[in-house]
Image (cartoon, grey):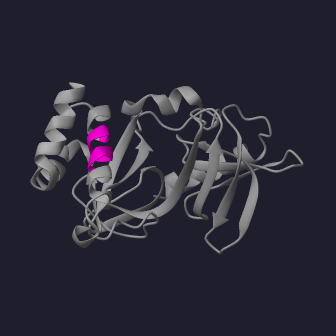
């Protein structure tokens, strides 16, 4: 843990001195843990898990998951509003870790994502690698996805075992028709995300008397089936 914190500190220092970091920069809002709200151009470094904020003066400030509550910006390249939240993620049943996750899909089944980290260490000399860019975010399989519902996180890898049974019980015919019509392979990441999105649509459009409360979009704690 101490080694990881040292690497993060070095990355923060280096990023803070890098006013011309590559990647996409979009105007947005960042809210710190202490409630302070700051605005400027935002770019998220997926590898170092650090959000960079470029001020009008050109100075770049960097913040870790321990400092940030959430940040949001409109991605001009993707033409979509993007939101990231800092949460106490339960990496084990008795261990939590502060992580920044992107809110990928909202609804009864909230979906969050985080870059799949390889075994290679962060290259401190080049911390700007993996800055948010249009090509990185298009590769769905570069990320781990976590589905949050009923105060529980479930890794998308456990879709068949942990998510599909409940979805099939509620909307089996509709979802199977959706899968058949689009001829999608439900073992793929994209297909599973599409199915969850359609499930959320069906759930949100149920008659009012049958609706159940949706999951909150900003999470502070929970349990997990697996990482």
Residue 106: x %, y % from top left: 41, 54
Q: Looking at this view, name the residue that lies furthest to the bottom.
A: 34
Q: Looking at this view, name the residue that lies furthest to the front.
A: 207
Q: Residue at x 58, y 53 (%)?
A: 6
- Between residue 179 and residue 91, name the one nearer to us: 179
Q: Which residues are magenta?
A: 193-199
Residue 4 showing in the rendered view: yes
Q: Residue at x 70, y 31 (%)?
A: 22
Q: Residue at x 56, y 64 (%)?
A: 66
The N terminus sits in image quarter: bottom left
Q: Is residue 74 left or right of residue 65?
A: right
Residue 140: x %, y % from top left: 40, 32
207 w.r.t. 4: above or below? below
201 w.r.t. 90: above or below? above
- Between residue 40 and residue 209, name the one nearer to us: 209
Residue 160 showing in the rendered view: no
Q: Residue at x 31, y 40 (%)?
A: 193
15 w.r.t. 30: above or below? above
102 w.r.t. 179: above or below? below
Instruction: Inspect the magenta stretch and tell me whether residue 116 lies in it.
Output: no
| Main secondary structure along the magenta-highlighted residues | helix
Residue 142: x %, y % from top left: 41, 32
Q: Is residue 156 left or right of residue 173?
A: right
- Between residue 216 and residue 62, name the one nearer to us: 216
Residue 59: x %, y % from top left: 83, 48
Q: Quadrant of residue 191?
A: top left
Total marks in image: 0
């Amino acid at each position: 843990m101490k080694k990881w914190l040292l690497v993060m500190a070095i990355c923060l220092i280096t990023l803070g001195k890098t006013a011309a970091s590559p990647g996409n920069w979009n105007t947005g809002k960042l809210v710190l843990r202490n409630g302070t709200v700051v605005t400027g151009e935002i770019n998220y470094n997926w590898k170092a898990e650090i959000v960079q904020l470029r001020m009008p003066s050109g100075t770049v400030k960097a913040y870790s998951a321990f400092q940030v509550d959430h940040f949001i910006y409109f991605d001009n390249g993707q033409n979509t509003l993007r939101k990231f939240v800092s949460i106490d993620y339960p990496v084990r049943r008795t261990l939590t870790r502060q992580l920044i996750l992107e809110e990928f899909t909202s609804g009864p089944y909230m979906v969050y994502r985080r870059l799949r980290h390889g075994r290679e260490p962060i290259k401190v000399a080049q911390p700007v690698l993996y800055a948010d860019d249009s090509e990185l975010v298009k590769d769905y399989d570069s990320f781990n996805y976590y589905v949050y519902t009923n105060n529980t996180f479930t890794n998308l890898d456990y879709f068949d075992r942990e998510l599909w049974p409940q979805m099939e019980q509620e909307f089996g015919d509709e979802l199977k028709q959706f899968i058949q019509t689009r001829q999608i392979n439900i073992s793929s990441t994209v297909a599973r995300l599409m199915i969850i999105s359609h499930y959320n649509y069906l759930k949100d459009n149920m008659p009012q008397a049958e609706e159940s409360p949706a999951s909150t979009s900003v999470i502070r704690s929970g349990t997990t089936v697996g990482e």
